């Protein structure tokens, strides 16, 4: 079993919930942000000392939901602070970016780190296409073409020409190339059936960065495995990542108190403008291939927001409690899903950073030894 310490780098100082997206930045305080970046980056580097196998970065825009608008910048900072932990870029929102630039930056990270990159090719959240003025209807096709182009950038030994539907380059030959051969492991989001099949076609790790329900997650995994087989390979547990908001404390009562407060800020403050913007974009575009997928996305957001903490633990979305309780929860999730990577978000909303550190240490000393062999 592998463990990823995933961080959203949230802004914890909103006095009132934002009511619109993009979120006005008049209350942004650069001095506080400087301190947050140092704290957050130090926590992410500390994950190596706490026995995590990966440290996970991400990309979001125009919102206090996360301060990581370029995950590669944080990845570069972590290269200098770590020695062996994998750098899980989960990841660049490839359809919004220049894919050759992504190929170059990922190759730099892989080479600088000595071959530690997990290369996430993420499609993104619907409203983020508004941020970069890209048509959401093109998201699938752009991601498909960009992924193929990036892999060709990494694996070609001679300059090549690319003439595609969305990207055209007369001659490409990147320096450096990645250290890992033929290229770093790929990871793609796979939280629904459509995305699971897409990830399998590209032979990427399937990333369910926050599962909503064990039964639905199991079905997505089955779809992914069948699609992998149809594409000529057998998916292993290491191909499956499941995401969970996680609080580990000395007692169940303490953990649940920390989690409840963190989730309240996460859902009622950080997610509020995100939900409204996403709903608006989904009403006007075909970001999802059919009405069923759109309804699933809307229902998933509503379910995550309205469940009690106990219901979220039961659903597998949340890992919360004393080390002994969290071990039991993780064993139950693994028994249901048979996955190989736990993606653990341990900074939730505005929860105290001291509680994050304590949870990391309890994970190292009392959780990892009981779950490493799953």
Image (cartoon, rainbow, N blue to C red):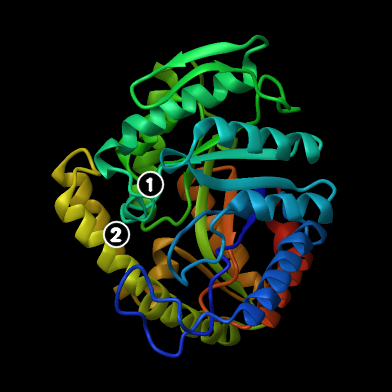
Q: Residues within 10 Å of mark 2 (few under 14, many from 20)?
A: some
Q: Which residue is mark 2?
A: 300
Q: Nearer the viewer, residue 233 or 183?
A: 183
Q: Which residue is mark 1?
A: 191
Residue 55 in view, yes or no: no
What residue do we see at 65% from left, 9% from top? 158
Q: Position of residue 97 (x, y in %)?
A: 47, 41
User: Which residue extends farthest right?
Assistant: 83
4 relative to 134, above or below: below
Mark 1 residue element: loop
- Alpha carbon separation for disc pair 1 and 2: 10 Å
Is label 1 in contact with label 2 (beta carbons under 8 Å)? yes
- Left or right of residue 22, residue 316 in this image: right
> Picture quarter containing residue 192?
top left
Q: Position of residue 182 (x, y in %)?
A: 67, 19
User: How many marks are shown on the rendered structure?
Assistant: 2
What residue do we see at 67% from left, 55% from top? 74
Instruction: Compare marks 1 and 2 and give the one earlier in the sequence.
Output: 1
């Amino acid at each position: 079993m592998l463990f990823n310490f995933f961080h959203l780098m949230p802004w914890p100082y909103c006095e009132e919930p934002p009511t619109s997206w993009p979120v006005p930045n008049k209350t942004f305080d650069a001095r506080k942000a400087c301190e947050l970046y140092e704290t957050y980056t130090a926590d992410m580097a500390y994950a190596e000392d706490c026995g995590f196998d990966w440290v996970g970065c991400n990309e979001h825009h125009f919102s206090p939901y996360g301060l990581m608008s370029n995950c590669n910048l944080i990845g570069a900072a972590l290269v200098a602070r770590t020695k062996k932990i994998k750098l899980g870029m989960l990841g660049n929102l490839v359809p919004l970016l220049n894919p050759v630039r992504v190929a170059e930056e990922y190759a730099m990270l892989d080479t600088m780190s000595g071959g530690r990159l997990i290369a996430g090719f993420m499609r993104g959240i619907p409203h983020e296409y508004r941020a970069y003025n890209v048509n959401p209807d093109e998201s699938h096709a752009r991601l498909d073409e960009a992924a193929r182009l990036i892999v060709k950038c990494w694996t070609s030994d001679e300059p090549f020409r690319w003439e595609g539907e969305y990207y055209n380059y007369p001659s490409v030959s990147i320096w450096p190339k990645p250290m890992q051969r033929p290229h770093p492991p790929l990871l793609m989001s796979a939280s629904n059936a459509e995305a699971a099949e897409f990830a399998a076609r590209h032979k990427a790790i399937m990333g369910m960065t926050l599962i909503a329900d064990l039964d639905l997650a199991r079905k997505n995994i089955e779809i992914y495995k069948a699609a992998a087989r149809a594409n000529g390979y057998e998916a292993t547990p290491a191909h499956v990542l499941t995401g969970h908001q996680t609080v580990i404390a000395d007692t169940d009562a303490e953990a649940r108190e920390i989690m409840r407060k963190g989730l309240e800020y996460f859902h009622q403050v950080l997610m509020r403008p995100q939900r409204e913007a996403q709903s608006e974009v989904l009403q006007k575009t075909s970001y999802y291939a059919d009405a069923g997928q759109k309804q699933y996305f809307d229902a998933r957001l509503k379910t995550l927001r309205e469940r009690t903490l106990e219901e979220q633990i039961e659903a597998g979305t949340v890992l919360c409690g004393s080390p002994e309780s969290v071990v039991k929860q993780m064993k139950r999730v693994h028994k249901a899903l048979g996955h190989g990577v736990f993606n653990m978000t341990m900074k939730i909303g505005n929860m105290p950073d001291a509680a994050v550190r304590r949870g990391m240490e309890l994970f190292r000393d009392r959780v990892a030894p009981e779950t490493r062999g799953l």
